Image (cartoon, rainbow, N blue to C red):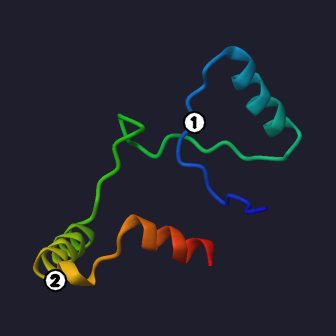
Amino acid sequence: MKVLDDIVSIQFLNQDAKQLILDLQKLNVITVLENQGNDDNLSIEIPNWQKELVNERLAYAKSHPEALLTWEEIEKELDA
């Protein structure tokens, strides 16, 4: 079983879910971190170097479509 080291954001769907998290915090099972300054919890600034890398890979994929894998090939590799 994979254990998550960090949780970026949680949206509580009801009061019971929120209370469960508070109870886990009281038991010292989890630590609740404060919002890291994002006004919108879902907006995260993507660094320019990462945008450039994605653009380079997209350009390569467009100019070398034969190097791309189909979804079936990806699934086969994942199942191997």
Element under disc 2: loop
Q: Which residue is mark 1?
A: 10
Question: What amino acid does circle 2 point to?
Answer: His
Q: Which residue is mark 2?
A: 64
Q: Which residue is at the far right?
A: 27
Return the x and y of residue 70 as percentages of the image width and height. 35, 70
Return the x and y of residue 42 as percentages of the image width and height. 39, 39
State the residue at coordinates (40%, 43%): 37
In this rendered view, identify the residue nearer to me: 14 or 27.
14
Residues packed near mark 1 inside 10 Å, few (<14), some (14 to 19) or many (20 plus)? few
State the residue at coordinates (67%, 60%): 5
In this rendered view, identify the residue nearer to me: 32 or 8.
8
Return the x and y of residue 55 as percentages of the image width and height. 16, 71
State the residue at coordinates (69%, 24%): 18
Question: What amino acid does circle 1 point to?
Answer: Ile
For the N terminus, give its image quadrant: bottom right
Residue 43, which numbered label?
Answer: none
Element under disc 1: loop
